[in-house]
Image (spheres, rainbow, N blue to C red):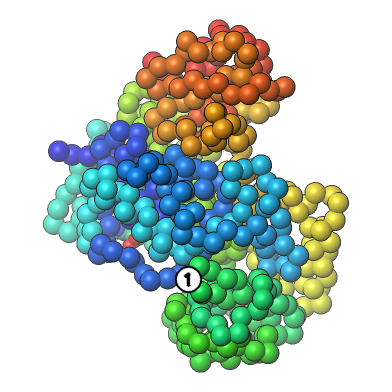
Amino acid sequence: MNPEVIVVGAGPVGMTAAALLDAAGLAVRVLERGPAGPRQAQGKATTIHPRTLELLDAIRMDTGHTVTDELLALGRPTGRVHFAVLPELLDYRELPTPYPFVLMLGQHRTEAVLAGHLSAHGVDVRYTHEVTAVEQHADGVRVHAGARVHEARYVLGADGARSVVRGCAGIEYPGTLPSLCGFVADVRLADPPPEVLHHWTHESGWISVTPLPDGLHRVFGARPGDTGLSPEQVRARQSEGLTEHGLREILHSIAGTDFGLREVVWKSTANDGTRRAERYRSGRVFLAGDAAHIHLPAGGQGLNAGIQDAANLAWKLAAELGGRAPAAITEGEHDYHSERARQSAQLARNTLAQSGLMTTFTPAGSALRELFTDLITGPGGTGETLAFWLAGLDVRYPGTATTGERVPDLRVDGESVFRLLRPDRFLIADATPAGAFAGLGGQHLDVYRVPSSNTFAGLLIRPDGHIARAVPEADVSAMVVAVRDWLVV
Ligand SMILES: Cc1cc2nc3c(=O)[nH]c(=O)nc-3n(C[C@H](O)[C@H](O)[C@H](O)COP(=O)(O)OP(=O)(O)OC[C@H]3O[C@@H](n4cnc5c(N)ncnc54)[C@H](O)[C@@H]3O)c2cc1C
């Protein structure tokens, strides 16, 4: 039987999308060019931000746990987070979320949890299936993988920065060229710094040393000679790669020590090339994750933004396939492209700004970093604003007043509302004393009582945890209108 949706790429974003589409009751097939099993033993993303943990709470596993529960059991929470590697850290500990910390966890472990869930749920994941072409027609898509042609109604390209799906859909990927080639490695240290270290000098460069689970440390940084490069120079350095000897030398030259470097478990380079797909959708083809946006891995955001893409898309695609999607979410102000492209524009701006702060090795750069440090630690709220931003808690989609904002962490019988969200269901949070909205529940709509609020009587909440409408009074007809605006029944 043909699936309804083909997801190309079993990276973290493709697997999250597949899990959410499956949870919404759709038949999904994932095509991955690599073999089954871990893609790598270590490396790439190590930070999972609060909003991502909230979103992954919507995926319930066979164990009864959510994906978030499984990740929490594996990772190392840290309540203080850097911005642009400035020594003064942002404080996540008071953020209004069930997860007021960054979870430090290797990307391979996050991927293993997602892959385990897809396998346990019987989602059709086909490894060693490299997609070479995608065509679309009036009723569906044909996806070529080797000699096989797979048919579906829609295809999602979650196939990374060099996306074949994006190319086949004729979607451009414009942006700014890389001029930085920094180093990054996961290492074992005999003599690690006692806590997170961000060490700077504008003569020799900067380095960050952060503890990871499993007794490892992530070290990354850049030296003055790593910046101001041409794209060709960046490419040449990346293909040369980083050697263990080279890393030891770099650590000595910046920090005066290699922290007792015992083993390099994974090493790579990072550049600040920044690109965004000009469209996230073309007909029956969607893009998510690195296929839709790349940037300097500053603040650890690529995987997090990609999972937000998946969460934004899954319920809309499920509604479209189920014939219950209003025009506003298929091709209007709330459609996938409109909402997520705005976010990736902000992400690109923010990571480029961090790149500016991190790679200006001059006295002027030092002055800029000092000014930013003062702003972060000062009373003006800059630190809090940046923390909200990095944590993903300030993601807001178009709308008036509170509409489009992430729902606050409401409690339903002591449990967070984020654990009750499902990709095929809206949720009414009923804060009226008499449960005025109780009768509105239905096939794609749950109603839960929540503690009374000064700001609303009822909230209509989208499956991805954003506010669709706030109804100020116990006015059932106003809520019915809100539901009809978002759900064609
Ligand atoms: C050094 C470094 C550090 C980083 N640190 C962080 C961090 O701390 N936090 C964070 O959020 N992000 C971080 N990132 C970014 C993060 O790793 C990426 O954003 C994330 O991997 C994107 O996931 P994805 O699923 O979109 O793409 P990918 O991880 O690239 O996965 C794409 C998948 O598609 C498959 N594929 C590709 N082409 C085809 C094809 N034609 N047919 C079938 N399958 C195909 C690939 O084999 C792969 O499995 C970091 C990146 C780097 C390089």
Question: Dividing the image into 4 quarters, which one contains the C terminus?
Answer: top left
335 or 319, nearer to the observer: 319
Mark 1 neighbour density, 10 Å: few (under 14) some (14–19) many (20 or more): few
Tell me the kind of residue under disc 1: Asp
Q: Residue furthest front?
A: 414
**Count of labels in the image:** 1
Secondary element under disc 1, as helix, strand or loop, is loop
Question: Dividing the image into 4 quarters, which one contains the N terminus?
Answer: top left
Q: Position of residue 371 (x, y in %)?
A: 83, 64
Q: Is residue 185 above or below residue 100?
A: below
Q: Position of residue 235 (x, y in %)?
A: 48, 77
Left or right position of 455 against 407: right
Task: Write the residue at 61% across / 75% down.
Answer: 209
Left or right position of 322 against 78: left
Q: Is residue 176 visible in the rendered structure shown here?
A: no
Task: Write the residue at 60% across / 85% down.
Answer: 191
Task: Write the residue at 60% across / 71% down.
Answer: 210
Q: Quadrant of residue 218?
A: bottom right
Residue highlighted by disc 1: 214
Task: Write the residue at 79% across / 73% down.
Answer: 366
306 or 38, nearer to the observer: 38
Q: Quadrant of residue 83?
A: bottom right
Q: Position of residue 488 (x, y in %)?
A: 41, 18
Q: Quadrant of residue 19?
A: top left
Q: Is residue 35 visible in the rendered structure shown here?
A: yes
Q: Position of residue 148 (x, y in %)?
A: 14, 53
